[in-house]
Amino acid sequence: MSNSTEKKSSLFELTKGIIKENPTLVGLLGMCPTLAVTNQAINGIGMGLATTFVLVCSNTVISLLKKAIPSTVRLPSFIVIIAGFVTLIEFLMKGYLPDVYSSLGIFLPLITVNCIILGRAEAFASKNSVGASVLDGLGMGIGFTLALTVMASIREILGSGSFMGIKIPVLCDNSMLMFIMPCGGFFVLGCIIALVNKLANKKPPKEISCAGCPHAAICKGAGSKSDECQGGV
Amino acid sequence: MEYILILVGTVLVNNIVLSQFMGICAFLGVSKQMKSSLGMGAAVIFVMVCATLCTYPIYILLDKFGITYLKTVAFILVIALFVQMIEMILKKVMPPMYKALGIYLPLITTNCAVLGVTITNVDESYNLAQSVTNALGTGIGFTLALLLFSGVRSRIDDSKIPETFRGVPATLIAASIVSLSFMGFSGLIG
């Protein structure tokens, strides 16, 4: 976890989410939208930016309200704040980007339960200053957007032989449909995470880590086996 | 007939985990053992059906006031409160069931499959009976995927996998193959 007591520069708060603690590829959070909307590059970018917007706004508000929210009802309060911003971005996208809005479909309202957002609210925004929380949200959002864009580009180029809707000469006649199917999503994400592990040259995480999971406290409280995540989010 | 179609559609053809990509975190986190898969699956079926019963009248109310755009906020709040309530009631009334489902209940508040089902019901403008069928089918589909996958995972643990792919990457690629096999059902209903 990043919220150790040592002082960190604001630049670190911004950049840590992009590569070092990338929420999707290293933290393994927010897998549902990562797999579901990445069959076209433009959807990946749209989803990433929508999530970034919600993440920055909710981090700001939660950080401002951190003293006002009693800790017993903090999770429901956080969820309501997040859901409010999700409704806002739904309206904005419906008005300005109707195409992306309709192709994201149900996954736009489901940003509410994206565990990256709740995870950052619980692990960072409720403990840190407003400025740091905004930077943290922005960095994590950019990291998420980048991961989604890379993955969606790979799937679109291999699966439908185009990029951002523009056809690529040789590939569009030899497209591998599997990559834009659900099974291709699992496959590409598995390969990207393996690649990140290889590049980072570290031991791959054995399982979904509890870092950043908003339910870490409940998990331990429930008396479950120490390293077994019950994976609620 | 219509209800059978919804059931088959949600359990096999549009399986919520393997083709809709909802509840992936729970799918990857809990499917290590058959026992925890069953517990999680039962809890999800239970909460999905109850949440559908709760959100159906609420949507009618929202519709009456013309504020259906608040459905995301209203639904997630209701689900969160409802799950807490079920937890308390089970603890008091049915301790054995609480023991079996207890630890999974608070965790599925933010499982996107539950919110996803309630929103799908509204989007498809299902009536109450259809909504409940849809929730039941989706829950069964979720449990089926978890159970099947826990079997696959126990085999992965025994096999020799390259260092880089060990852990999550291998699990995801196995999930890809399971998902591929579920695509075979896609011709089942038109």
Image (cartoon, coloured by chain):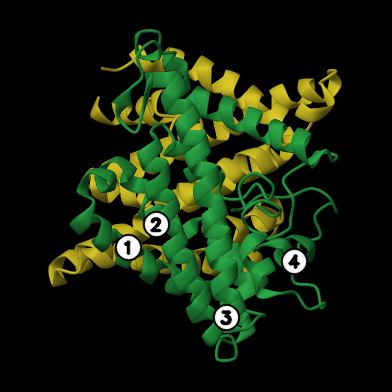
Chain colours: A green, B yellow
Which of disc 4 and disc 2 is earlier in sequence? 4
Question: Is B141 rendered above or below residue A122?
Answer: above
Q: Amino acid at mark 1?
A: Ile
Question: Is A138 rendered above or below residue B101?
Answer: below
Q: Amino acid at mark 3?
A: Gly
Horizontally, residue B92 falls left or right of residue B136, namely right
Q: Are marks 4 and 3 on the same chain?
A: yes
Q: Which residue is mark 3?
A: A131
Q: Which residue is mark 2?
A: A50
Q: Nearer the viewer, mark 3 or mark 1?
A: 3
Q: Are marks 2 and 3 in contact (CB under 8 Å)?
A: no
Which of disc 3 and disc 4 is earlier in sequence? 4
Which of disc 3 and disc 2 is earlier in sequence? 2
Q: Secondary structure beneath disc 2?
A: helix
Report the number of discs.
4
Seen at 57% across and 62% down, the residue is: A139
Q: Position of residue A104 (x, y in %)?
A: 33, 44
Q: Could you classify mark 3 by the number of other residues whose Cα lies within 10 Å: few (under 14), some (14-19), or many (20 or more)?
A: some
Q: Are marks 4 and 1 in contact (CB under 8 Å)?
A: no
Q: Amino acid at mark 2?
A: Ala
Seen at 77% across and 22% down, the residue is: B156
Horizontally, residue A167 falls left or right of residue B47, namely left
Q: Which residue is mark 4?
A: A2
> What is the chain letter for disc 3?
A
Q: Nearer the viewer, mark 2 or mark 3?
A: 3
